[in-house]
Amino acid sequence: MATKVILDVDTGSDDAVAIMTAALSPEIDLVAICTTWGNQAIEDTTDNTLRLVDAMGLDVPVYQGCDTAMVKYLTNDYVENRPHVPVMHNGKPVIMHAKHLDLPEAVTRPQNVPAACFYVDYLRKATEKITLIPVGPLTNLGLALRIAPDIAEHIEQIVVMGGGSKITNCNPWGESNIWHDPEAAQIVAECGAKVVWVPLDATHRACITMEDCRRFREIGTFCAKFAAEQCEQRIIVHNAQQPLDIPDAAAVHDALCVAYVIDPTVLTDLRHCHVEIGLAGYGEGQTIVDQRAYPLEKNGYFAYDADRFKFVDILCSCFARDPQKA
Amino acid sequence: MRKIIMDVDTGTDDAIAIMAAVMAPQIEVAALCTVHGNTSVSNTTKNTLRAAFAAGREDIPVYPGAAGPMVKDLSEVRRIPVPEPVLGGTAEVDGVTVSMNPDLLPLPDPSCAPQATPAPLYYLEFLRTTTEKVTIVATGALTNLGLALSLDPMLAEKIEELVIMGGGVKKSNITASAEANFYKDPEAAAIVLQCGAPITLCTLDATHSCALTESHERRLRAIGNTAAVFTANDVRARRESYARFQPLERAGTAPIHDALCIAYLIDPTVLTCVEDAACMVECSEGIGDGRLQVDTRSFHAAPNVRLVTQADPDKMCDILAEVFSGRGGVTG
C-alpha cells in the first residue's frame, strides 16, 4: 500500500523535482502539499507550487503556510538572508531558485486554511500514521506542534531536508532551511515522532550530473524534461558557487527525502544519534550532532551518505510514469 | 454590549475577572481560552470551567490553549526553574493555610467539558468569520494569541481592542526585571504587542496601585454571593501573602491584577494614568528576558500601546461590588 505523505515545500527548483517524484511514485500517496517561505517569499513559493500542480494536472490540495519564522525576526540583531546571487551563463543570469518557475500561470488557488491548521486538523483525524516530508524552513510544523503537541502521535516519520554536520551553506555554520527558523527545527527535533534528517552531508553525495540530466531528457516526459531543466540550472550555479566533489553536478536536496521514502536504502549511512539545533549566538541555526562517546539521548536519524546511482534510478522510474509527453 | 473573548490562566485573579465579566450586563463573553501560567493548562482549564460555573455561566465555551511557551522552553538557560520563584506561596490566616494561587480553585466542578478545538485555532476560525470586531482580554501568558497571529497576522484587523494584564514599568515580580505573564512567553508577548491592534496594557504598576484593602474586603464579603465571597477570600489570602512575600507600598493591600482589565471595560475611568507609548518585550537569554521595554526617548518610535500605570482602588472595588450585587455595574 502506498505511503500517505504530506510535502512541505518552498518551491524552489529542487522542491519542484521533489514534488514531481512524490506525485508520480506508486509508493507514495501524496495527500497534500503545504507551502512555506524560504527559497522565495511565501506568495512566490505558493505560486510556484500551484504552477507545477496545474502543469502536472494533479488533484492535490495546496495549503499556504507562514511568511516568516516563528520568532527569529523579533530580535533586533536579526540579519536578513542574503539574496540569491546570479551566475552569468551564456549572457543570461541564472540563480538557484527562480522567483517564478518557467511554467504557465496557475489557475488553481491555495486552500483557505493555513498550512499549520491543516496539519492539526488532518493529523488529529488520521486513522493511519502519516509521513511528513518538510523540505523548507520548518515554521508550519513548529507552529502546528506547539498548537497541538498530540499530533506527533499520528506521524509515521518526519523526513527533513535540512542541516549539515560537516557541510553548511547559508553561513559558516548553518544550512539554509534550519538557519531560517531554528526554533521551529528544534521543536521538530524534540517532538517525539521519528525524525530522519537528510542534511547537506547526504544531499551533496547524491548529486545529479549533466550526464544524468541527459538521461532524464531521453525519457521524454514533461516531468523528466522539467526536472532536467531544474537540475541543469542548479549545476550552473553549483559549478560557480558551490562546486561539488564530482564536476558538473548539483545537489537536488529535497528530492532525496522523497527518494528515501520510496526506497530507504538510498541513504547509505544513516546514524541514530542526538540532534539539536543551535538557537543563539554564533551557533544559531547550526545542526548539532552529539559526537561524543557518551551522547545525549538519541532523538533522530542523521544521514551522512547516499547512493547517487540509486537516487537517479528512482527519479528516472518516477519521471517515466508521467503520462504527459514533453 | 461589548463582545469579548477572555484568555486566562485561572488563577484566582483570573477567576474574579471571569466572574465579573460574565455578570456584567455591559459585557458579553463569547468564549474563554485557557493557557499555561499560574498553573498547568490542564488545571487552568478546569479552574476556568469552575469560575464560569460559579457565576452561573457554564454555557460559555472553554477552549484549552497552549501548555507551554512558543519557544522559550527550547533553550535550557531560559527555561523557568521548577519550582519557580515564589510569588504567592502560602500563608496562615486564622490558623488556616491559604494560597493566593492554588492549583485547583475551591469551587465546584461543572458537568461540562472543554471544547476539542485548541484555542489558537478557535481564534483563527472566530476572527476570520466574525462580521463585527471583538475585544480580547488576555490575562495570562500570551502564547495562544502569539500562535494565532503567526498563523494569520491579518487576524489583528478583527480585534476591536486588546486589553492585556502584563509587564511592568517600575515594578516586576517574577524576576528582577520581568512580570510573570510576559516572562512566561516573551516571544508571544512581543508578537502581540506589535500586531497592530489597539492595545490597552494594564501593567503591574497599575494593578499594584489599585490593590484592595481590608475595608474593600469587608464590603465585598457583605454582598454574600459566591462571586463576592470568593473575591473577598482572595483579597484576604493576597493581603497576607503579599505582606509576607511581596510587600507593597500600601501595607495590607491585595492586587487583583486580572480583574482590572474587566473593571476597565465596565468603567474606563478606573484607570487614572494612561499614556500612549512605544513598547516592546525583551526576548533573550539574559537578565532582561520577558521585560517590558518602553521607548522613553524624546524621539520615540510610533506608539503601539496605551500604557496603563495607575488605577483607582476605590473605584475598582465599587465596580466589582456593583457587578457582584447585580446592580448593573453602573458606577458614579
Image: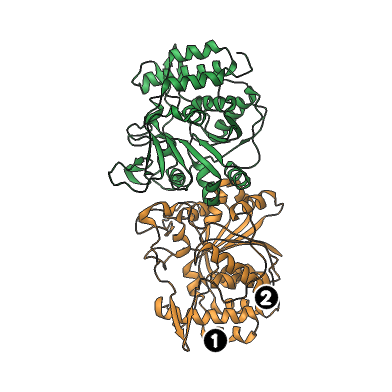
Q: Quadrant of residue A59?
A: top right
Which shade of the palette goes to chain A?
Answer: green
- Disc 2: which residue: B329
Q: Residue furthest front?
A: A1
Q: Quick one: label 2, few (<14), some, or many (20+) residues within 10 Å?
A: many
- Nearer-the-camera pick, B71 or B166: B71
Q: In this view, does B60 lie above or below A219?
A: below
Where in the figure is residue B1, as x and y percent of width and height?
71, 65
Q: Which chain carries label 1?
A: B
- Disc 1: which residue: B215
Figure chain in orange: B
Which mark sits nearer the N-terminus, 2 or 1?
Answer: 1
Q: Residue furthest bottom?
A: B94
Task: Report helix, strand or loop for mark 1.
Answer: helix
Where in the figure is residue B17, as x and y percent of width and height?
59, 70
**Residue A21, visible in the rendered structure:** yes
- The residue type indicated by label 2 comes to Gly
Query: Residue at image x 49%, y 35%?
Result: A136
Where in the figure is residue A109, as x and y percent of width and height?
66, 33
